[in-house]
Amino acid sequence: MTHPATTDIVEHWVDGKPWRGESARTAPVFDPALGVAQRSVRMATGDDVGVAVAAAAAALPAWADSSVATRHRFLLNFRELLNARKDELASILTAEHGKVLADAAGEIARGLEVVEFALSMPHLLKGEFSQNASTGIDVYSVREPVGVVGIISPFNFPAMVPLWFFPIAIAAGNTVVLKPSEKDPSAANWLAELAADAGLPAGVLNVVHGDKEAVDALLTHPQIAAISFVGSTPIADYVYRTASAHGKRVQALGGAKNHMLVLPDADLDLAADAAVNAGFGSAGERCMAVSVVLAVDSIADDLVARIAARMAGLRTGDGRRGCDMGPLITREHRDRVAEYLDTAVTDRARVVVDGRDSAVDGDPNGFWLGPSLIDRVPVTSAVYRDEIFGPVLSVVRVEGFEHGVDLVNSSPYGNGVAIFTNDGGAARRFQRQVTVGMIGVNVPIPVPVAYHSFGGWKASLFGDAKAYGPNGFAFFTREKAITSRWLDPSHGGIDLGFPRNS
């Protein structure tokens, strides 16, 4: 297997091999820790996407008709190869996204969990059977693949998010066209080539690179049956509306503004650790990052001081040097996030820790912004309202439990939320009252394990299908219900009445 991250141009992967396509247009792929373009990525035209879809459509009949044992054997091989070579993939993630190696390894581990869950496909693809539902009549159901699936994944998890989707889609008998982020594209090619090494037939998993032109081609292509998307809320809304209008099944996971409510009875050391870990891991570029701490007034000063003390020990720098937090994905994104610190001052919030002043263990040209802490953030401020998607942790002071729940529920987002408390009754009330899809009780990043499903409410999820878990197999299959009667020669006659059980 070649190493995609060593090539000058990251090409598409179509029909089991690298493919250049028609387009001469490329985009730079940066090493965010160095601030330099390390290679380019080929940007697909609509016609290029059409070639990839045609390859997936050509591979579909044979793969959909393959035995459960064949698909299961591929998943076993793929799981073993991925586990054996995960360090190689982690180095690609760090080089193109910037996250530290330990965080990259964690991303791969969570993706591996979904591959392992997909191995349960012989059970999850079973239908149901009712013998003698009516006299001499049996009723049963079967689950069949939806067809060619389009997957559009974001820059912040270039390995994990594709692994949320394509192993389950392929296990269910579908074929796939994956469009990763053009900012860190090499992981997708690496996974596709690994799948080929594991025995996946050509055309079952294809990768096309590009921007909006490629996305629109997938959303509107008549041979694409379903779309899985993860990204910001405005784009998720666009993907859902466009693909739905073209008759496709859609799951579109959007953005977030995740709150963490800390009650006076909470273990404040545990809460401070959690706020730092969940706020600054992966430089805050996570849809499940905690970006707002709701601190009850009576403990707010103490909690802010404990958070700031922990931040002082964080080391920002090149993820290959054992640092705690790496750079942001692009210079433009770094500058956009940094502007919120100026907004905070304008809105009379208190910048406790300014990440622009952080010392960095890395190349001065990297896209650096250290962890930042802002206290007394008004809920009218863009610092509170916007999904910043960077290492900026806001503290909003609340009067008590009810005030905190009201703020959580008034947010347009409903992805993740956490409560820190030692009061079981308060925790139970919280989980029942908040209008959020994923809830943590003394757990700051409540990402469900692979055999549950991932997804939020409100503007954090468009469509009603969550990712992976049981929802994943339901999304990537269609159910047929068969009513069957085998008549003996003595049976017959005409009866125009509506069929009824007897």
Image: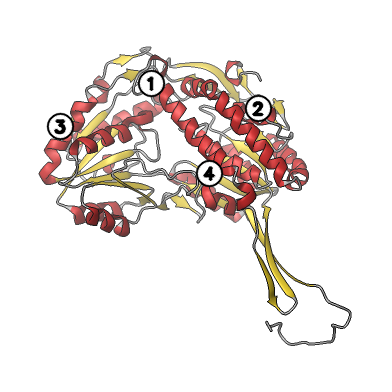
Image point 65% across, 41% down: which residue?
176
Outermost top residue? 363
Q: Quadrant of the N terminus?
A: top right
Give how far apart the Cα atoms at labels 1 and 2 are: 30 Å
Image point 84% across, 82% down: which residue?
491
Circle number at residue 367: 1
Residue occupied by mark 4: 229
Give how far apart the Cα atoms at labels 3 and 4 are: 39 Å
Residue occupied by mark 3: 305
Q: Residues within 10 Å of mark 4 (few under 14, many from 20)?
A: many
Location of residue 294 in the rendering, given as x and y in whole percent from the top left corner: 22, 45
Residue occupied by mark 2: 193
Foreground mark, 4 or 2? 2
Among the two numbered marks 2 and 3 on one chain, the one whose residue lies closer to the N terminus: 2
Tell whether label 2 touches label 4 (CB within 8 Å). no
Q: Quadrant of residue 23?
A: top right
Image point 70% across, 48% down: which residue?
223
Amino acid at the residue labelled 2: Glu
Among the two numbered marks 3 and 1 on one chain, the one whose residue lies closer to the N terminus: 3
Question: In front here: 138 or 62?
Answer: 138
Secondary structure beneath dot 2 equals: helix
Tell whether label 4 touches label 3 (CB within 8 Å). no
Amino acid at the residue labelled 3: Ala
Among the two numbered marks 1 and 2 on one chain, the one whose residue lies closer to the N terminus: 2
Q: Quadrant of residue 350?
A: top left
Amino acid at the residue labelled 1: Phe
